[in-house]
Image: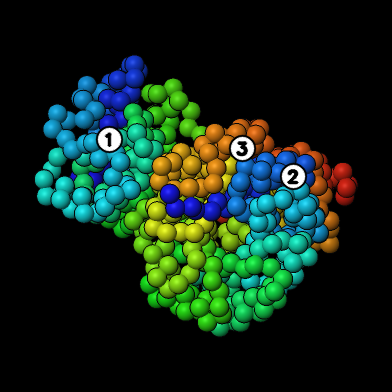
Amino acid sequence: MRPVKLVDATLRDGEQAPGLAFSPEVRAQLAVAMDAAGIFQLEVGCPAMGPAEVDNVKAIKKVCSRALISAWNRIRPSDVEASLSSGADLIHLAWPTTKLHLERKIQKTWAKAAEDLATCLKLAKGQAQVSVGLEDVSRATPEELSRAAELLLSLEVKSVRLSDTVGILTPTQARSLVRFFLNKGFLVEFHAHNDLGLAVANTLAAALAGAEKVDVTLLGVGERAGNCALARLVDLTSHKLDLGLTLQKAQELEDLARPYLDRAFYARNLLASKAPDIEGFFYKLA
Amino acid sequence: MSLIDATLPVLVAQGHNIDRRLSHRWAQALGQIGVTRVKSPKEPVVASEALYGLDGALTGDYQELFKKLRRLGQLEVVFGDDEGWATALAACWLEEGGSNLVCSLRGVGRLPALESLRLYLHLSGREKLANSGQAFLEIRQLFERLSGLAIDPFEPVLGRGVFAGESGVHVDSWPKDPSLYEPFPPELVGAKRLLTIGRHTGRVALRLKCWQLGLTWPEEKAPDLLTWIRDKAVELERSLTDQEFVDLAESHMGTWA
């Protein structure tokens, strides 16, 4: 069976799910367990959030002996500096693949964003491994995909993460995207979201299409409807791919995390809130 | 006809009694989101002549298989969930131009999930939804009443908390363009954006929360307030309720105007 490396993002994307906040002790406990279980990479935070987050990453780096520890970054030199100071093994940089993300989210020209990416890569060079995440890749036009690939090749980026940021891919589309980037010579990682309930199947399709790494979270926790759930993926891929851990191990990890991922209290309060709709205040910031 | 709803016969097969009036309302609500073939409680879940036994197809050359199957005409098509990917396989079937797909809300009866497939059809441009929020609300309520099952607040499409936001990166996108991190607008499925304050809160979220609660924006104290919020969230190991947020701020800054 072909090996596929697991990247667990519970301590970064997973914890971004509204309602959750892990204490340093919980973070360490989960990281140690995932490290011991054989998860290849742990994405554990965004050091740009501040000194406390830098300390969080440092602490996890200290207690993990095998897993690669990665940190998520915007294409800002200050983000990369924070991540480097945390001792992360891998710096992950998020690239806005679509015009929508370029113009509306980071509000830069393509040329300026490309320049910033180059600066960030230069900063990280020799100090940490690097991967670039193609955010919103599922809504990108063929031209945007080609343009991103050409840019990354010109900057000698080898590893790309394909992020289905809004969770709208089908398995056919996931497979096709993975093949497109494999054919360009990249090592491909796939990051799913579960908005249509397809995160696990899309991840399976990406792995079968040749992705080197696939992203998961414990119990599929994450923003909106969540991410790809570890144990469900391991279950679906048994006899097809080698993810480096057994279903039993995956279930044990999720059992360990379950109390910390319980959002029942939060959800009750959230849905009972009588606060006015938030859209009425957007104009003040637009 | 893309989707055939078999929710009611599945619920009957599971031992639920389906009131005729509710059954009628169910069909009406589904009709409002463009699902026009809704099986009655007395119908079989699957017609006597149907295509099934395809559950494992996702790991093979399903595109070629589907091309051949489409030539067989207008039979009902059933993907069971034995492999755990019925909805995904069903989406691939629709993507290849397939129709007559038997499904059920939330995939009850181990069928593909109707709500996900309906949103897939909308997003692919094949069958657009419009003004469907009220119908989704009705579908959600009726399903809970008919099945006795509660819909999880964070489950795909139907969860009422799916569009909650806390993290800086996501809430920051709301005033810029909410579609940055949303596959479809919440109002399309009868949901709302809900703002939470917690460990990942950034400045934009804090300002929005202050306005939402009618509190004066404490410009100079904002960095400190963000630190207090993060510390409190870590201490509680969860996000803050609105009241906890107000209490926290007042404990540091005095009574809020």
Left or right side of B148 for B28:
left
Across and down, in percent, residue A272 comes to 61, 35
- Residue displayed at 55% across by 42% down: A245
- Which three-letter amino acid code belongs to the residue tagged 3? Leu
Across and down, in percent, residue A173 comes to 36, 59
Give the class, few, some or many, for how many residues have Cα within 10 Å of label 3's Cα (few <14, many ≥20).
some
Mark 2–mark 3 CB contact (< 8 Å) = no
Give the letter of the chain under mark 2: A
Residue nearest the viewer, comparing A55 with B184 = A55
Mark 3–mark 1 CB contact (< 8 Å) = no
Residue B190 at least partly seen: no
Q: Regarding mark 2 in the picture, which secondary structure is present there?
A: helix
Residue A37 at least partly seen: yes
Residue A192 versus residue A156 in the image, above or below? above
- Residue displayed at 44% across by 22% down: B148
Determine which residue is flagged by label 1: B5
Q: Regarding mark 1 in the picture, which secondary structure is present there?
A: strand
| Residue at the extreme front of the image, as rendered | A1
Residue nearest the viewer, comparing A278 with B225 = B225
- Which three-letter amino acid code belongs to the residue tagged 1? Asp
Of pointers 2 and 3, the one earlier in the residue sequence: 2
Determine which residue is flagged by label 2: A28
Determine which residue is flagged by label 3: A253
Kindly report the distance in space between the C-alpha atoms of the residues bearing marks 2 and 3.
Answer: 13 Å
Q: Regarding mark 3 in the picture, which secondary structure is present there?
A: helix
Give the class, few, some or many, for how many residues have Cα within 10 Å of label 1's Cα (few <14, many ≥20).
many
- Residue displayed at 67% across by 60% down: A71
